[in-house]
Every structure is written in C-alpha cells, then in structure tokens.
Amino acid sequence: MRFLHTSDWHLGRIFHGLHMTDDQASALDELIALVKDSNVDAVLIAGDIYDRAVPPTQAVALLDEVLRRLIQDAGKNVIMIAGNHDNADRLGFGQSLLAQNKLYITGPISAATKPVVLADEFGPVYFAPLTYGEPLAAAELLKQPLKTHEDVVRQQISNQLTLIPPTARKVALAHVFLTGAQESPDSERPLAIGGATTVGINCFDAFDYTALGHLHACQSGSSKVRYSGSLLKYSFNEASQPKGVHIVDMAADGSIAVETVPLKPRRELACLRGSFAELLREPQAELYDCYLQVTLTDEQPVLDAKYRLEQAYPHILHLEYARLGSSNNNSVPAADHKKLGPAELFETFFTQVNNRELTAAEKHLLLDIINKDAQAERQA
C-alpha cells in the first residue's frame, strides 16, 4: 500500500491582507501532479482543510476542484478528517454518500465512526480517522468522562481498535499537538487556553503509521509518527521551514518506508532587515519575487517607506521598525499608568518606543511644553 500524507491546507487563509487562494491552488496543482506521478493508492489529509469554520466561497470551490481531480481524474482514494480550524459538521456533510465514491470524510466525533478499509495485493489496510474534538464536546458525544485532549484521542483509538483485527495493518489520522513537538509561533491556533492540550506519542503505539496534522513544521515524533506540516508557509516565523508531503510505502508485514517530497511555492517568504537607505542602495535581486517582511533599523520614521521600497521589492506584506519591537521589559506596568502625571507618562512611552531614556535637554523641553500647555489651559 502506498499513500500520501498531507495536512493543514488552510484554504481561505488571509495573510497580512493577502488572499492566498491563488498560492494555494498553485501548491495543490503540484501536489496533484505528485499524486499522479508517484502512483499512490490514497491521499490522507490530517485536518485543517479550511482556515476557518465558515470558509469563503473561493476556498470551497478550490477544495471541490482539487477533490474532483484527485478522485475522478486520478482515480485515487481520499481520506480526510476535521481539524481545529474546520467546522466538523459542515466538513462532514454527505460523508456516507461520498464514501461510495472514494471520498472518506470524518467530521464530528462519533462513537459510530468506523475505520476506512482499503486493500492491496497483501490484504486490507485499516485507516482510523481520529478527528479533532474539544474534550467537553467529545465527552458529551462519546458519553465518556473526558477531560483532556489525550483522553479524547485515547477513547477514539479504543473505539477504533475494537473494529480492527489485532494483526491487521493499521494507519491513524489525527489532528493533535504531540508532546515535545515543534510549534510555529503566529501560525497555529492554540487548541485551548490552559489545560492539558498535548498528546503523548505512546497513544499511537498500536499503529504501523500515524499521519498527524496541526503543527506546521514537517517533523517526526518517531519513524512511524509524523507531521507532514502545512501546505504553505503561513507565518514569517516559518520562512526557513521547508514544506512538503510524505509518501509512505507499507509492506505486507506493516513495515514502512517514508519519502519526504518538498513542495515549491509560487512565492517564497523571506525576512529583510536593514536601514531604508541600505535596502534601496543594494537591493537583493533574489528577493524580488518573494513575499517580504521588512524590518527597518532607522531611528526616525521614513516617509512613504513601504511605497518607495516596493519599487525594488514589489511584494512587501509587512513593514515594521526595529525600534518599535524592542520595548523595555522593565517599563511601568499598564496598571500603574493611571497614577502617573503627563511628564512621567510621556517618559515611559518614549522609553518603550526608543529603548532609551530622555536626555536632560529633552526632559527640560518636555517640562517646558507641559507647563506652557497647563498655563494656556488655566488662562482659558
């Protein structure tokens, strides 16, 4: 059995004001070509198909077209589960009908969920869809006292294993935060605020391979438990992360061989740092076609900086000043600001913005302005 593992497409994503549908369509064209060339039996999508619960129509149309090409044109099986960004009920609409045509979708958690069974020349392979669910909601749906995300996963696995012969080859699809795995800040939505959100790798000991989704870095917890990572880079913190998919070959005895195949985006993400004059004087031609985050090291604001830099770098998505991102961690807490007078408030603000204190001359000028303003107010 040969299958392709992918996840976290986040169709409908808006990144710094940019609708990424065209970029996602380009990456999915590459994925479809890979599916055809590699002769896989199935495509596994481990959650976060959409970026939000109510996706835009363009995202729905793109998914519809991709699934048509994978199933009707290429003749492949597709198995997908809901992630924490998806609305499980919407994603799972018509799943019993679609399963008759090689599209196996698992939406909401249910005690009635069955494994997907595909066969090769060595016999059946059981795919256990461990769809994402919040512990409180899952406890109600499964009628079990579940308090953590690991509780939810273990209960789903227990239900699935009762339907799978012990010696059969088994594959799990799960959308979880594996304990000890690498996060991508600013990109992944937390599964919960507080509480136990991580899942131990030993939950998946019964499976020959586990296809994980949720974390955007392509990584492995072990040779048999892997994240494919996201389809594209969805944060400038991911600029150096390679993106791709796993192609998994499973032998008759359940042993696996995994090949990670990189995907080339339509445009790369990159971070550029320097003074305004330096960036214009020595433009980096290799970044001309990249989506950019530009960090200016100038101490003073530059008039129309983004517009002027776009003459050399036309795809700037975000521009910031280094001095505004290096505020003093020892500044007065926000709760104490109400106790400060105008001079103290301005000094605190100035220090946070410029990462230095006012000079004696600047303090004298500030006090002079405040006194004149107060005098004018009294006279009025």
Image (cartoon, rainbow, N blue to C red):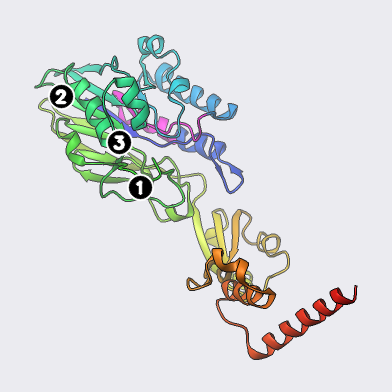
Percent x, y of residue 123: 15, 16
Q: Residue at x 48, y 71 (%)?
A: 329
Q: Which residue is mark 3?
A: 149
Instruction: Tell me if mark 1 has few (under 14), some (14-19) or many (20+) residues whose alpha carbon lies within 10 angstroms of its own.
Output: many
Percent x, y of residue 338: 62, 66
Residue 247 can be seen, yes or no? no
> Residue 217 has which mark?
1
Q: Which residue is mark 2?
A: 169
Whether 61 is drawn above or below 289: the answer is above
Is 341 left, or right, of 150 in this rendering?
right
Q: CA distance from mark 3 to mark 2?
A: 25 Å
Q: Quadrant of residue 298?
A: bottom right
Indicate which disc, 2 or 1, sits on the residue closer to the N terminus. Answer: 2
Instruction: Tell me if mark 3 has few (under 14), some (14-19) or many (20+) residues whose alpha carbon lies within 10 angstroms of its own.
Output: many
Element at badge 3? helix
Element at badge 1? loop
Percent x, y of residue 337: 60, 67
Q: CA distance from mark 2 to mark 1?
A: 27 Å
Q: Quadrant of residue 86?
A: top left
Name the amino acid type tagged 3. Answer: His
Indicate which disc, 3 or 2, sits on the residue closer to the N terminus. Answer: 3
Is 169 left, or right, of 96 in this rendering?
left
Give the foreground label among 3 and 2: 3
Name the amino acid type tagged 2. Answer: Arg
Is 142 left, or right, of 165 in this rendering?
right
Indicate which disc, 1 or 3, sits on the residue closer to the N terminus. Answer: 3
User: Which quadrant holds the C terminus?
Assistant: bottom right
Whether 157 is drawn above or below 245: the answer is above
Q: Residue 100 or 366: which is nearer the viewer?
A: 366
